[in-house]
Amino acid sequence: MGAARGGFFRTGPLPGGAVSRRARVAVVAAALVAGAATGGCAGGAGDRAGDGTPPGAHGPSSTVPSPAPPATSSAPAPSPTPPATSSAPAPRGPVAAELSIPSIGVEDLDVVPYEGTTDDRPGTRIQDRGVAASPYGERGGVGPGDIGNYLVTAHRLSAGGPLRELPSVEVGDKVHVTAEGTVYTYEITETRSTSFRSTRSLAEQRAAVPGEPGEKPTRAMITLSTCATPEDNAAGNFWRDALHNPEHRIDKVGVLTSTRPA
């Protein structure tokens, strides 16, 4: 067979003499088939994959390049915004305290907080120990120094009578309450009378603004309360409730004027 040049085969006379045209065509076809099997297109993609796809049908490599990483900024990420805070002091709530009323000689009287209302059974039991009681919660008051009505009750005659002289406290007298390292000073502004037989009167005593049920408080206030037993007896009023409390109580109301470290 003649050598392959220029991309085609020279078909000159073959060894052994002349051959027919049909024979020469058969020889050329056989040569073309042999060339495709040994050289071809350098292993087409279809051959490598074994899917029968003709060589070169896949075109360029089908490998998909990885996506470029997202652009990044050299600026630092913003810091999270801190939650808003209020400069107002948090309510002190129910804490033990000590009460001093210089004008009547009361000094460092223990005030025990409890959940309830003025002169109820738990409160009366505390007073029976010779100390003062301070109710808090839905039917009570607030803690020392808090906005609202800080209620403090104690016996006048029994259990040592710690508030025996409370009726003589006058407008302008100072009351000091010490709690958790702070002294709260109140100034007495008025005297009130509460009737245990009047729902309205009790509501006024226990209101967040003393004497004004339903009003929203804007100041820290205090109500000091003790029984009016001698006055009721003198008037012939011997009514008592189930806890032996007389009908009336004497209340001294004050407003917070200053605070200082204890």
Image (cartoon, rainbow, N blue to C red):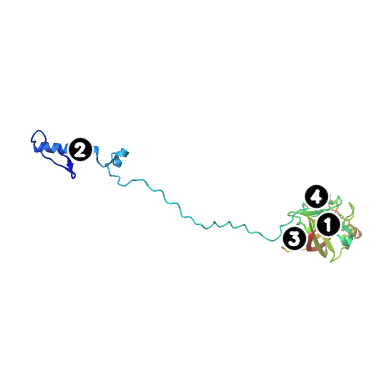
For the residue carrying disc 1, how many other residues have a C-alpha within 10 Å: few (<14), some (14-19), or many (20+)? many
SS of the residue at dot 3?
strand
Residue that label 4 marks: 122
- The numbered mark, 2 or 3, whose residue comes first in the sequence reads 2
Visible residue check, residue 38? yes
Asked whether disc 1 touches disc 2, contact meaning CB atoms under 8 Å apart, the reply is no
Q: Position of residue 261 (x, y in %)?
A: 79, 59
* Structural distance between the alpha carbons of marks 1 and 2: 117 Å
Q: Nearer the viewer, mark 1 or mark 3?
A: 1
Name the residue at the top extreme.
Answer: 16
* Callout 1 amino acid: Leu
Q: Which mark is residue 33?
A: 2
State the CA–CA distance, disc 3 to disc 4.
Answer: 22 Å
Give whichever of discs 1 and 2 has the lower sequence position: 2
Amino acid under disc 2: Val
Residue placed under numbered mark 1 in the picture:
99
Tell me the tag on residue 148: 3
